[in-house]
Image (spheres, rainbow, N blue to C red):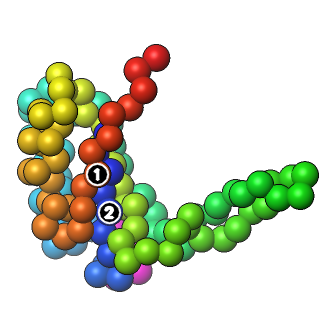
Amino acid sequence: MLMIYRDEAAFAPGQTSGAHSGSYIAYADALKAAGVFVGGDRLQPSSTASTLRAGDGAPEILDGPYADTKEQFGGFYIIDVPDLDAALQWAARCPAVGQGAVEVRPMWVV
């Protein structure tokens, strides 16, 4: 899984497309053309998140993201590649590398 972290403040509230979208569309198209794309999507702003924590006998629901950080988890790609080296090569091509960070993490295969 390629997890994208970027500073949400760089984007206008409610923006669903724009200058940044083209590079992500091209990247997704390249993943699909290579036959490694499994899924992925952009997430709504972290201000729309709810976080649950253990409370006194019942979960406590908090408004907002899990952590207050400079960069927020903004989207993901799930890819099917043979090994970590291939995943890192694809991650290096992701537009988010120049705008924030891309975390590469294997998923559990059940």
Q: Residues within 10 Å of mark 1 (few under 14, many from 20)?
A: some
- Identity, as a three-letter code, of the amino acid under mark 2: Tyr
Name the residue beneath numbered marker 1. Answer: 103
Main secondary structure along the magenta-highlighted residues: loop
Relative side of 47 to 6, left or right? right
Q: 101 or 10: nearer the eye? A: 101
Dot placed on the residue nearer the N-terminal end, 2 or 1: 2
Mark 1 is on which residue type? Glu
- The quarter of the picture where the N terminus appears is top left
Q: CA distance from mark 2 to mark 1?
A: 8 Å
- Residue drawn 45% across the image and 63% down it: 44
Residue that lies at the very extreme toward the top in this rendered image: 110
Question: Magenta span covers which residues?
Answer: 12-16
Relative to 52, say whether 33 is above or below: above
Residue placed at 66% from the left, 71% from the top? Answer: 63
Q: Nearer the viewer, mark 2 or mark 1?
A: 1
Image x and y of residue 29, in percent: 13, 42
> Residue at position x 29%, y 81% from top?
10
The quadrant holding residue 81 is top left
Quarter of the figure with residue 4: bottom left
Can you give x and y, in whole percent of width and height, for residue 50 in the image?
A: 64, 63
Q: Is residue 107 left or right of residue 26?
A: right
Q: Position of residue 97 (x, y in %)?
A: 16, 61
Residue 104 appears at what percent x and percent y? 27, 45
Using the image as rendered, state which of residue 24 and residue 109 is in the foreground: 109
The reply to whether the C-beta atoms of the residues labelled 2 and 1 are less than 8 Å apart is yes
71, 85: nearer the viewer: 85
Secondary structure of residue under mark 2: strand
